[in-house]
Image: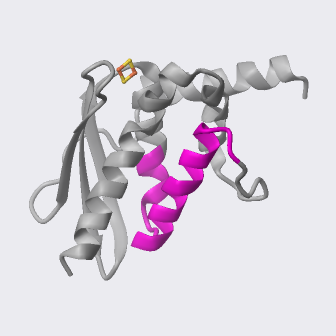
Amino acid sequence: MSFNNLDTLYRQVIMDHYKNPRNKGVLEDGSLTVNLNNPTCGDRIHLTMKVEDGKVIDAKFEGEGCSISLSSASMMTQAIKGKKIEEAIKLSKIFSNMMQGKEYDEDLDLGDIEALQGVSKFPSRIKCATLAWKAMEKGLMEQEQNK
Ligand code: FES
């Protein structure tokens, strides 16, 4: 596939998550709650996660933001469901490396998340893409520390 076709495909994946967000909403009682702002634009994410036996069994998000931030939140919630806490945090580190243009294990099947790799070429948008991931990491790290 040529780069242009790949770009088009990635753009379509991003727009699909933006227009049809997965896991939009708020989980009721018993959930981990994180509110985080993007300091550069003031947009925010409200993330709720349900963790049982060290596993993320559900996650939902709400918020305001651009297509990059909201599609990234949709992909993130999809990716962490069913993952152990340490696996979800590891995925966040991999995503952060991807956004900084650093090396990551490219053999990993990241699914739709790969569509965001082009964001690394636009430094001003990296905080948009990582907002939901930072919120997830913050919530799960706090959960681990409070055990
Ligand atoms: Fe605010 Fe992207 S411009 S999150």
Quarter of the view holding residue 61: top left
* Quarter in which the N terminus is drawn: top right
State the residue at coordinates (19%, 60%).
Answer: 32
- In the displayed orientation, state which residue is furthest to the right: 1
State the residue at coordinates (45%, 47%).
Answer: 76
Q: Left or right? Give the position of 26 relative to 67.
A: left
Q: Is residue 99 magenta?
A: yes
* Quarter in which the C terminus is drawn: bottom left
Q: Is residue 81 magenta?
A: yes
**In the foreground, 35 or 97:** 97
Magenta segment's dominant SS is helix
Q: Does any portion of residue 54 appear in the rendered image?
A: yes
**Rendering coords of residue 133 (x, y %):** 41, 47
Q: What colour scheme does the image use?
A: one colour
Residue 47 drawn above or below residue 12: below
Over which residues does the magenta segment extend? 76-102
Quarter of the view holding residue 6: top right
**Rendering coords of residue 124 (x, y %):** 49, 20
Residue 5 drawn above or below residue 21: above
State the residue at coordinates (28%, 70%).
Answer: 51
Q: Left or right? Give the position of 78 relative to 146.
A: right
**Rendering coords of residue 117 (x, y %):** 65, 35
**Rendering coords of residue 49 (x, y %):** 26, 58
State the residue at coordinates (77%, 53%).
Answer: 106
Q: Does any portion of residue 84 appear in the rendered image?
A: no
Residue 74 drawn above or below residue 50: above
